[in-house]
Structure formats: C-alpha cells, structure tokens
Image (cartoon, rainbow, N blue to C red):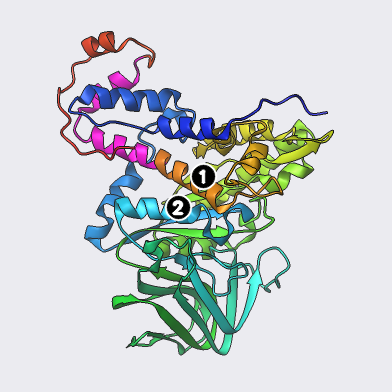
Amino acid sequence: MAPAQKEVDVDEVLNKVNRSFEMTCSDNLLDSMRFFRNYLKANPNRIYLPDDDYTFFDSLFAQLEQASDEGKTYRVMHYGDSQIEMDRISSVLRDCLQSFFGGSGPNMIPAIQPVATISVSQWASNLHRYMVYGDAARASHHRYGPMLQFSQVTGNGSISFAQSSHSRALPRVKEISTVSVLLGNNSDGFAAALRCDTITAEPKVLAANDSVSLITWKLPAPVKRGTISFSGTADIYAVLLDGEPGIAVDNVPLRGCAGNLFDRIDESTMRQSFDLLGTRLILLQFGVNRIPGITSTGHIVAYVKELENQIDYLKRVAPDAMLLFVGPADMGKRYNGVMGTWKTLPELNDSLRAMSLRKGVAYWDVFHMMGGEGSMAQWVNHNPALAGPDHIHFTFAGAQEIGSNLAKSLTTYYDFYKMRQHVPSEKVIEFVNLDWREDSIRTAGRIKLPSYNPFGLKTR
C-alpha cells in the first residue's frame, strides 16, 4: 500500500512557482541583489548547480551574447524520452532563449521523423533509417550520430521540409534561412542540392570521406519550403533548419529510452558532430521509463550508475558543452483504487539530483516543481488538463508550464550574470554568502552597494 499523499492544488502550486521567478527591477541595486541571493539559496524551482556555483553558466552566457555579432549559432541538445515528443517542452525553451540571444527555425531534425512534430513538416524518399535502439533496423557499425539514428542514401534520395501549419507552432520556428546537412561516410563525388521556394542554391559536391562533414546553405531570405536532393552514398545524421545566428534548441525524443545508451555510439563520430555543430549545452530528461522496473534502493543505485556512465561519455565527446539533467516528472500508479505516486520515484529523483551535482551536472527538479507526491493525478484532473489519462505524459498545456518554468530558471541565472558585470566580484561573493534570512536593514548596513541599478534586467 502506498503512503497517504497530500492533496495538491495545482493552481496554487503553479502560482507559487510563477511568483518565485518574479523580480521587480527598481533603481535599488540592493533589492535586485537580495532577490538573486534568495533565489540561489532558497528557491525550490531553481536549477540546482554543482557546489552551488552561481558562475556555472557564465561561459555559456558569454558565448551566447556574442553569437549574433560573430555570425555563429550555438546549439542546445535536448535529449529525452517520449515526454518531449512533438517538440513539446523543447519548443517553449527554444522560443524563450531565442528571444534573449537570437536565432530561429525548428533547428535540428532527423532525415526521417517517425513521430510528427508541431514545429515543421517533413518527408523523405529513398532513404533507409537505422537507429541505435527500438524497432528500427541496426547498422553494421556504431556511427549513429548525435540524434542516435541516421538515414542512408544509396543512389538518389531526398528530404523535403515545409513551414509548419500546426496551431501550436511558435512564430520563430517558421523563420528558416540557413539549411545544413550533417553527414558521414560519403562516397566520392557525393552531391547535395537544395531547392527552396523560388531559390535554387549552389549544389555541394564532396570528396570521399569516412568522417563527419557539415554542409551549409545560407539563403538570402527566409523560405517556406525546400527539398534537399542527394546523389551518391552517405549516412545522413541530421538536417539543420536554422535562421539568423544565435541559439538553436534541438529536440531529440527517444521513445521508451531510459537515457542509458549514448555510449553505444562511436565516440569519434559523436565528438566530431558536437564540434561541428557548436554544441554548448546538453539537456538530459530521463527516468520515467525505468520507474516501473525499480522496486528497491538497489535498483535505483544500479540505474543511477548507468546514467553516471552516460555523463562520463558525454563529457568525453562534448568537452565544450555543459550538462543539465531534467529530473523525472511525477508518475501516477493506482493503489487500492486511488491514484498516487510510484513509491520509488521520490527516492530516484533525490538520487539523480545527488549524482548529477556530484558529477558536475546541473539539475532541475520537475517532480517538486509540479507539487511533489500526488501531483500528477491533479495535473490530469486540472481544467484544462495538464497531463493525459495515462498519468505519465503532459498535454501541450502542461508541457507549456514545464518548458516555460525551465526557461525562467535558466534565464534568471542569465539576469544574475548580467547584473554581476556591474558589481565588484568581491561584493557579490560577500553578499551571496550572507544568510539569506537575515533582516534586510542589517544586510544593507553590512555591505555597501551602489544605490542605483545601472543595467536593464528583464522582469519576470
């Protein structure tokens, strides 16, 4: 029998989450410093950082700020299970980050998409798909690429895409002006030609190459549709549908996956791919698919060790990227006719967070953000429904909440980064290390800060 679980008021929970990110930027720098200190020390909806190091994302933010001026696009890889299919969650995070740092388009897609996405329409001909797991065919090698799959072209083949007409497609995903193909193991004279709307780009012809290549067409204007035609033999790892320089968020859903199979892929292929792509942040959103098989602490220890091995692998193949683990959501199970949380889920969530922080990986706690034990049932019963009747997957409305709050947590760290550019670092350290519960008057008297706010921060 499952222990009794509290009744969760979803509206109250979400209102509290939203209030936790609210910051009024006045002319008083002390007020802003106090908000950030309290956020770092006490906000349960924050992204937890290894060693509580508030500079963890600084190098990422510095690069993203320069991306547009330098004509570069840096990529965020969002790996997850079926919870992120159809570009749910990723699309919300993408739109928010692009509003800060520039960029557009649906970003990375596989040559063959088995599950339709809200952000782009696509189809292919004369390609054969291989995947590292699942019911797809296996290749004779392990060079599957960063989407854990590839599609082989032998002779002639094509990939077509079109601007999404889905009602939930966000405006920025429709702005496509840079098209790229990530490929490998191509034959001599392999050719790729791009035709978009009324624009026909120069074809790309490659010499024989058994490593990874990236070919790119920068178009003079955004396009609504296009077709990439291939001639020859190659493994197509991904197509990139981007816009202006900035940031890209690549949605990689792996239905049924527990996140424990990255190390089945050839390390050289992955390392070359992440380097060519400019990958700077990797999100891992897994756990739910393993929960039904976890019945003891020993099972949790074994699974966490598997994920620890994956983190070591990803650090080897993507040394320029930082990692963020997005913890499992609440997951419902019926006990004596009453829907509650799987018994082992809270312990698994705590173990994943502890392991992530110990391994130098940031962690965002979805389970507690939702309201903790018993929350999934209330997300299902909410009007409108925030999760489906399987008590596992979010609806689009629920995914909006998850993606939005993940984005708010990340961009709050960015606002703190911006603010710190105007305050001596020793003052920041001294202020942050104060007990966050101290009386504001005594705090103001102990540390002298400028009485004005010399920067523009986005309010929540």
Q: Residue at x 47, y 71 (%)?
A: 165
Mark 1 neighbour class, 10 Å CA radius: few under 14, some 14 to 19, many 20 or more: many
Occupied quadrant, residue 153: bottom right
Question: Would you place residue 450 above or below residue 281 in this image?
Answer: above
Circle nearer the N terminus (2, 1): 2
Occupied quadrant, residue 117: bottom right
* Camera-nearest residue between 15 and 123: 15
x, y percent for residue 391: 69, 45
**Magenta span covers which residues?**
410-434
Occupied quadrant, residue 29: top left
The dot on residue 92 is 2
Q: Residue at x 51, y 81 (%)?
A: 159
Q: Are marks 2 and 1 in contact (CB under 8 Å)?
A: yes
Q: Residue at x 67, y 50 (%)?
A: 258
Of all residues, the one furthest to the front in this rendering is 383
Hey, what amino acid is under mark 1? Answer: Ile
Q: Residue at x 59, y 63 (%)?
A: 148
Q: To which residue does mark 1 refer?
A: 402
x, y percent for residue 255: 66, 58
Is residue 418 highlighted in magenta?
yes
x, y percent for residue 220: 26, 78
Q: Is residue 280 visible?
A: no
Q: Quadrant of the N terminus?
A: top right
x, y percent for residue 247: 36, 57
Q: Element type at marker 1?
A: helix
Is residue 377 highlighted in magenta?
no
Question: Would you place residue 457 above or below residue 4 in this image?
Answer: below
* Camera-nearest residue between 361 and 65: 65
Hey, what amino acid is under mark 2? Answer: Val
